Every structure is written in C-alpha cells, then in structure tokens.
C-alpha cells in the first residue's frame, strides 16, 4: 500500500562530491547513537560560518527538523522528512520558492541534509499494511546524528574564539583607560617624566587599532599597550617612593629608574637639566642691571620662530594674546605639567612665562626635560635671579652664528640682534651687566 504524503517536483539535480560525502557520513552513523535535535541545531547555529551555512539555510533546517515528530533522534530510526515546498515556506517565514530552493541546496552542500529522491522526483512516504512507513523520499536529516560530535567541537571552538576576542577587546579598553588616567595624573601631580613623549607613544599604539581585525592582531597591540602601562605605572610608583627620600638626596639624585634604553621617561628634575639651566642663566645673576621694559613681541618671534608653527591655518602672531595662546599649545606638546606651568606664571608673570616657554620650545631638541628646565628657571625667578632677556639674546646670537655657518640670512639675523641691542641701550638709566654687554658686543654683531 502506498500513501503519497506530499508531492513536489524536484527536477534534475547534478550529483556533487559534497552530496556523496554526506551520504557516506550518514551510512557510518552508529545504530545506538542518540542526540537531542535542538541541542545539535544550536551547535550548528554557533558554527554556521565554519560550516558555510547561511541564516536562511538554517531557518529552513529549523523547519525541516520540526517535521520530525521526535525530539530525540536515533541512529537506527528513519530520519527522512517529506514536507512540500508550500509547507516549508510557511514554516520558514514565507520565503520565496526560488530562495527556498537555493538555500536547500546550501544545506545539502554543507552536509547538513541529504536528498532522498523518488523515481519521479516527488517527496512522499510509502506505508505498509500496518501503517508503518516502509520507504520515504524527501530530506534525510541523519547527518544531524552522524555529525553531532563534529558540530559540537566546531561550536566549542567558535565560542572559545568569540570569548578570547571579547576578552582582548576588554583588555584594550581597560588598558587604554588606565594609561590615559595615569598620564593625566603624572602631568597634574608634576611627576618628573617626559609626558609629551609618553603621550606620543600612546597615540602611536592606539593608532594601530583597526576598525575590524583578527584576534591575533589585537593581542599584539594589547601586549604593546600593556608594556607602556607598566612603564607609566613604574614612573608613578618611583615618584611616590622618591617623595619619602631625604630632601638632599631627592634634590641631587631624584629621577625615574628604567632599564629600557629607549625609555620614554626622562626626569624633569635630573641633574643634567639643572646644569643646563645653570649654564644658560649664569649670566643673569645681576638681574637688576637688565632692562625693565618688556621685550617687543617682534624680537621674541624673531628669536623663537617655531612658535609660528603652532598657529592654526599657518597665520601669524599679531599680539600677546595670540602669543599666549600659542604657548598654551606648546606646553603640553613638550610634556610640561600644568602645575609646573602655573608655578612659572606665578613666579614670572604670564607674559614672561610664555616667553620662557617659547625659548624652551625653540631649542627643545637640546633639552632633555622641558618640565625640569622650566621648574629650575622658576626657582631662580622666585629669588630674583632670572630674566627672559638673556635667553632671547642668546637665541638671536645663535641664529646669527647659524646664518654665518650656512651663509644665508646673515644680514637679517644681524639686524635682529642689533635691534635687540638698541632696546637694551635705550635704557639709559640702567647699568647693563658685563655678561649682557659681552653678548651684544661680540664680533659680527652688525655684519
């Protein structure tokens, strides 16, 4: 006795290696195997990318599994379902017939189902006299049982990779947040370090993070960022320790220890910076003999032309307000902490402090720690032993000497230095210091 349960023409379909492989796997299923079809389906969903299945194909597989009456699938049971296309379309949320056929082919190619075609290409089941199904033609879901362990392993691997990816993203987020906070703390608290260079290193690392990247790439970036985190942490901890040292030891030897030769940290209060500062301001002991009038902004810009590079749009600096704004840009780029800057403005005055920043910025390639140098000059200003005049004159003299070496711009540099000298000499009621006079009267001043 034959009962035609559902009739849907298949048409002619070519046999593929994928179909043959699925059939071989299905024949090898152990007879005593038992699986929970929805548990296996969940594994297939998790591993769908590895299997090459699409979302639409899985929606059809979900519908096919629902046509089997049992939740538990056995290796020795009949695992063929024979729904019509109309029934599948209804249970697969109404997808078009052409889409249905295309994604059924995907399920076959992925080895998730096997086609069991009847001689006439229709899907139906033949029942015996007792009502038992003797032969069914349609879709064989036995690969769900045969490959259950494979699907489980693939799903576990995918879940592990997703977890590892999530963890490395969390590592990057936490590390970025901590590094930024520690840098801000170091600058705000005046911790002696080249924070400008640290910020540049941080930006270089985070700039490598792409919008989409494999886990291995993010792991490498996370390790590099954690290395910077360790350096910043060590700098802060070292500073805390030095706070407990004897004042004399701290004054002479306080610095941040770091075993890396290319460390981004350099002390703001290192002895080298103090020597440098002392040498540059040694001629300013008799500050009372220096001009009391303000330096003209034109002379300052002639001595510190690099400040013009900080103006947005390449415009010029026309007044002291714009000059102070440029100094505010130069300060963090050199790693000068807000506390060091505020202390300098209090001791020198806002305009004098800005000129000092400009002079340091002009020759920052010769200064290991701009913050330490500024603090040293601030200390001298507090006791009346510092003036910006010698710094600006020294820069103009260096500009003239460089022009002589290159053979270009000699006349312009000499004019700048002569103009500054005239400003000094017009202070008729002041007795100019010998050191400043020597600077002005060096040979070549007017040539």
Image: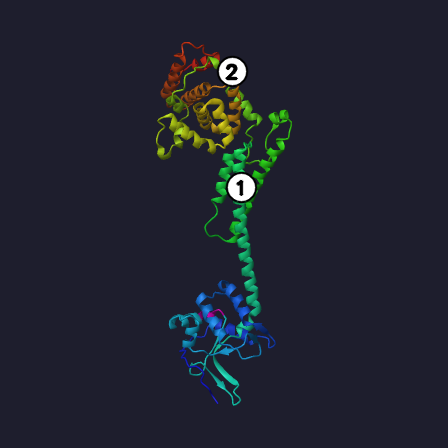
Q: Tell me if 245 is positioned left or right of 266 in this view.
A: right
Q: Nearer the viewer, residue 236 or 228?
A: 236
Q: Tell me if 54 is positioned left or right of 318 in this view.
A: right
Q: Residue at x 49, y 25 (%)?
A: 344
Q: Nearer the viewer, residue 62 or 126?
A: 62
* Disc nearer the start of the sequence (1/2): 1
Rendering quarter of residue 264? top right
- Locate residue 305, reporting x and y percent: 40, 27
Helix, strand, or loop for circle 1? Answer: helix
Rendering quarter of residue 27? bottom right
Residue 306 can be seen in this image: no
Helix, strand, or loop for circle 2? Answer: loop
Colour option used: rainbow
Residue 250 can be seen in this image: yes
Q: Nearer the viewer, residue 93 or 200?
A: 93
Is residue 107 in the magenta section? yes
In this figure, which residue is indicated by the disc labeled 2? 285
- For the C terminus, give its image quadrant: top left
The mark found on residue 69 in the picture is: none
| Mark 1 neighbour density, 10 Å: few (under 14) some (14–19) many (20 or more) | many
In this figure, which residue is indicated by the disc labeled 1? 179
The range drawn in magenta is: 105-110
| Vertical order, 66 against 263 (above or below) | below
- Locate residue 52, reporting x and y percent: 48, 65
**Prevailing SS of the magenta stretch:** helix
- Locate residue 420, reporting x and y percent: 39, 17
């Amino acid at each position: 006795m034959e009962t035609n349960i559902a009739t849907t023409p298949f048409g002619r379909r070519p046999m593929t290696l994928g179909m043959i492989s699925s059939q071989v796997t299905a024949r090898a299923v152990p007879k005593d195997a038992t699986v929970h079809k929805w548990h296996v389906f969940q594994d297939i969903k998790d591993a769908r990318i590895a299997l090459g299945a699409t979302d639409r194909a899985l929606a059809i597989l979900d519908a096919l599994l629902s046509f089997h009456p049992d939740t538990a699938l056995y290796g020795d049971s009949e695992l063929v379902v024979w729904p019509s296309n109309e029934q599948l379309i209804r249970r697969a949320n109404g997808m078009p017939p052409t889409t249905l056929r295309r994604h059924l082919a995907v399920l076959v190619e992925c080895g998730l189902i096997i086609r069991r075609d009847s001689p006439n290409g229709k899907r139906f089941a033949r029942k015996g006299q007792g009502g038992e199904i003797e032969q069914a033609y349609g879709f064989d879901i036995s690969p769900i049982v045969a490959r259950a362990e494979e699907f489980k392993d693939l799903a576990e691997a995918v879940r592990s990779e997703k977890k590892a990816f999530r963890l490395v993203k969390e590592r990057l987020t936490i590390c970025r947040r901590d590094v930024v906070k520690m840098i801000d703390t170091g600058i705000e608290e005046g911790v002696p370090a080249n924070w400008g260079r640290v910020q540049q290193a941080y930006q270089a690392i985070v700039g490598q993070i792409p919008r989409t990247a494999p886990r291995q790439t993010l792991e490498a970036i996370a390790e590099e960022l954690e290395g910077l985190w360790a350096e910043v942490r060590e700098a802060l901890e070292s500073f805390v320790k030095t706070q407990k040292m004897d004042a004399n030891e701290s004054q002479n030897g306080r610095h941040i220890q770091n075993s890396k030769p290319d460390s981004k940290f350099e002390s703001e209060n290192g002895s080298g910076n103090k020597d440098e500062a002392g040498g540059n301001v040694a001629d300013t002991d008799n500050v009372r003999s220096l001009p009391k009038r303000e330096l003209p902004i034109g002379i300052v810009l002639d001595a510190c032309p690099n400040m013009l590079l900080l103006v947005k749009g390449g415009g010029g600096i026309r007044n002291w307000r714009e000059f102070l704004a440029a100094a505010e840009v130069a300060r963090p780029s050199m790693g000068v902490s807000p506390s060091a800057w505020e202390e300098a403005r209090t001791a020198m005055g806002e305009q004098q402090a800005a000129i000092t920043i400009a002079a340091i910025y002009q020759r920052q390639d010769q200064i290991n720690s701009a913050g330490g140098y500024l603090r040293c000059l601030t200390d001298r200003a507090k006791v009346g032993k510092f003036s910006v005049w010698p710094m600006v004159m020294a820069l103009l003299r260096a500009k003239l000497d460089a022009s002589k070496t290159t053979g270009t711009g000699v006349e312009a540099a000499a004019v700048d230095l002569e103009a500054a000298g005239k400003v000094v000499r017009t202070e008729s009621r002041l007795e100019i210091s010998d050191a400043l006079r020597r600077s002005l009267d060096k040979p070549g001043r007017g040539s």
